Every structure is written in C-alpha cells, then in structure tokens.
Image (cartoon, rainbow, N blue to C red):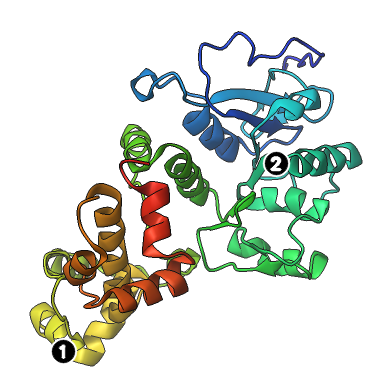
Amino acid sequence: MPTCVKIAPMNSPFASSPLTGPRVVTLAYDGLCTFEFGVAVEVFGLARPELGHDWYRHATAAIEPGPLRAAGGLTVTTSGNLDLIAEADLIVVPGWRGIGEPVPALLIETLRAAHARGARLMSLCSGLAVLAATGLLDGHRATTHWRYADAIRSRFPLIKLDPDVLYVDEGQVMTAAGSAAGIDLCLHVVRRDFGAEAANSVARRLVVPPHREGGQAQFIIKPVPQEREGQRLAPLIDWIDGNLDREVTLAEMAARAGMSTRSFQRKFKDLTGSAPGEFLLARRLRHACDLLERQADLSLDDIALAAGFGTPATLRHHFRTRLATSPAAYRARFGHAA
C-alpha cells in the first residue's frame, strides 16, 4: 500500500540551508512525471560542494494535498506547499499529468504572481501546459514535446510554438521539449547563472554533453542508420572538427567518405539528423561558442577565422539568426570571467 504524503505549512526549507544561491522550487502533484521531476532535482537539488556556497537552494512544493503519486508506483513527500513559491527565484514545472488536464486556478494565480515579482518560470516537456494556462506565454516563443504540438496549438493559439528545438529561453520564461531536453535546458540555466565551467562540471557528473546541437527533428521517427555507415562517417566527423578554420565543401566531404555526393547527403542526414551543410554550420557555431567562453584574449576577428566564418560580420549574422544573440552578448553571459 502506498504511504500517504503529509503536506502542511512549515518553516522555509531555505532558512537552514548553508547555501546562499538562487532558490529553486520544483512543483509536485498527483500524477507526477518522475523523469522530468528527477532531472530538476538532480541538477538543482544535488549537493555540489565543488561549486561553492552560492549554489542553488532547492525545495519541492506540493500544488495540492496528498497522496502525491508519481509514475512508477512512487509517492512523493515534499518540502512544503505553494507558499514556497513566494520565496522562489526559479520555479520548475515537470511534465504535467495530462496535456488536456485542467490546471488548478490557485496554481495559475501563484505562478502569475511569482512572474510579476521577477521569478523565472521553467517547464519541462508537457509542463508547458501549465505555463500556457497562465497566459504568460501568449505572443512568445515556446516549445514542448513534438507529440503535443498540435494539442498545444489548438488550445493556446497565441503561443508561438516551435516544436523543432530542444528548448526556448525567453528570458523570464523557459520551456524544454521532450524529457531528455529538460537536461539541456537545466544545463543552459546553470550556464546562464554560473558560467560554462559550472555547466560542464554538472554535465560531467550526469555523463551527458554540456550542449547538444540540433533539435527535435533528430529524434522524430526516422530510419536507423546501419552501423557500418556510422563507422564509415565517424572519421569524417572527426576530420570536420579538426578543419573548422578552413573552407569545407560538400564534394570534399563526400570524397572523404568514399561516396557520391547524392548518397553522402542522404546517408549523412540519416546518421546525424542534419544535412551536411547544417551540421558543419552547427559545429562552427559550437566552436565559436567554446572560444568565446574560454578564450577571453581572442578578438572576434580571431574567433571568426578559427571557426571558419571568415569575418566578424558573418559570425554576428549566424549568431543572430541561429542563437538570437550576438557574440559579444554571448561572451558577456557565458565567458569564463562571467
């Protein structure tokens, strides 16, 4: 028999914390999505003494009386109730219990009040349904799992839904796509708050890449490439990464892979989820980001050349169109000295 969860007002769990960093509250409810909830707790709630005393302070808030049953037959005991949101700097909404399930009016009101006082709101996967119900995303970009895209568009037509990306950062409101994309967004928040080195440290503990290229299109049903093609193209991808500072043509890549141009384009996209040109551009952008984060002494001219963009103007163009920021703003936010 599951154990009922007691949810009662209590003293703030933040008051006795030895940490001094941003206060993060992850919501819990009956029908909780265990994976997304676990992602938030793992990133924001795990002790990380190597990252100092200004690391996140984390608590879990129940949005309703218990028992709170989670996927997998678990029950959840929380740090407190919705009163905790009044203290939160960041509020995380895990995957919601059903894309069409109503959102309690008290929760909507509480999230709106938190947003009005400057707290950040973040949804993981179908948790978008909760933020959408607040109206705070109307007229703004957002994302969710691709399988929920049509339902969200139908119910919330004012949201500028982009189901092709892993996450969207609108500043005060952030949304992640499918379950694993929640890790990507959480690491992005760490990068925003504490810099690239902290995000990389958390990623190493999770044994995941600190940044994934591409979007959900890579993970929507498509043929699985044959293993021999992966082995055949792996050396080429290593070669691309080692030659980002020079012009790389489609014909050169196909020749190195020992394929015709047409076959190469098809098999490369099957393997990576991206066309060769898109893949190359993403690698160039990632390399430029790495240099901006780690090499404060490099000028934009140096970085543009090292990443294969040629000129700072071209570098700025791709940052603006692909990352919705400028190289200078990216360095100011994520640079090692930030």
Residue at numbered disc 1: 251
Q: Is residue 282 or residue 258 the one in the foreground?
A: 282
Query: Does the image show residue 100?
Result: no
Q: Residue at x 82, y 49 (%)?
A: 101
Image position of 258 with respect to 156: above or below:
below
Considering only vertical position in the picture, is 180 above or below 139? above
Q: Measuring from the top left, give residue 177's x and y in whole percent.
A: 56, 56
Please report contact status of discs 1 and 2: CB closer than 8 Å, yes or no: no
- Quarter of the rendering occupied by the N terminus: top right
Say left or right for 332 vs 311.
right
Mark 1 lies on a secondary structure that is helix
Please provide percent x and percent y for residue 143: 61, 61
235 displayed left or right of 96: left
Q: Is residue 246 visible?
A: yes
Q: Residue furthest right?
A: 105
Q: Mark 1 or 2, which is nearer the eye?
A: 2
**Above-or-below relation of 273 to 70:** below
Quadrant of res 146: bottom right
**Occupied quadrant, residue 168:** bottom right
What's the residue type where badge 1 is placed?
Answer: Ala
